[in-house]
Image (tube, helix red, strand yellow):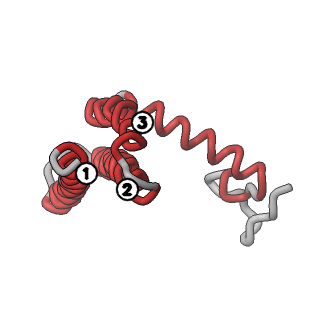
Amino acid sequence: MSAPHPLGTAPANPQKTRTGLHRLWHATGYSLQGLRTAWGETAFRQEAIAALVLVPTAFWLGRGWVETALLAGTVVLLMVVELLNTGIEAAIDRIGPEWHELSKRAKDMGSAAVLLSLLLCAGVWGAALYQRLIHG
């Protein structure tokens, strides 16, 4: 059962009035729709396909649960940052197609976040591969 809105009017988003398992059920649906939408983005699709290889490989490469979690976690982190960057870009594009310095800054910072997470992922994987294959 949903609680009444404080001002007596219905909120614009019905999700705001849901609670408990009902809210969780709907939130899960929205999240899955977000992943389906993200699949249409080339960068996310490439990262997701790489994750299908890298996450299982993390269990072979990692020498304990911490290393395995770090390897798999950096891959998942990259995908999370890509999702956030895509969300920022979509919100900026929703505002308008004209060029604006603040829009450019937001998009550039989102892109920089993806770059940093990609470098982190590559660095962790590179170090783990070096340890496993060179120092065996």
Name the spot of residue 42 as percent of width and height, x first.
Answer: 27, 30
Ranked by sequence position, the earlier of labels 1 and 3 is 3
Residue sitting at x 41%, y 51%: 68
- Residue 56 is tagged as 3
Name the spot of residue 2 as percent of width and height, x first.
Answer: 81, 58
Residue sitting at x 24%, y 54%: 124
Residue sitting at x 77%, y 49%: 22
- Cβ–Cβ below 8 Å for labels 2 and 1? yes
Ranked by sequence position, the earlier of labels 2 and 1 is 2
Identify which amino acid the numbered label 1 is placed on: Ala
Kindly state the secondary structure of the residue where label 1 is placed.
helix
Ranked by sequence position, the earlier of labels 3 and 2 is 3
Tag 1 residue: 128
How far is disc 3 from disc 2 in space, using C-alphas? 13 Å
- Cβ–Cβ below 8 Å for labels 3 and 2? no
Kindly state the secondary structure of the residue where label 2 is placed.
helix
Residue closest to the eye, 82 or 89: 82
How far is disc 1 from disc 3 in space, using C-alphas? 14 Å
Location of residue 86 (image quadrant): top left
Tag 2 residue: 67
Residue sitting at x 47%, y 31%: 36
Kindly state the secondary structure of the residue where label 3 is placed.
helix
Name the spot of residue 65 as percent of width and height, x first.
Answer: 46, 55
Q: Residues within 10 Å of mark 3 (few under 14, many from 20)?
A: few
Residue closest to the eye, 17 or 79: 79
Q: 30 above or below 36?
A: below
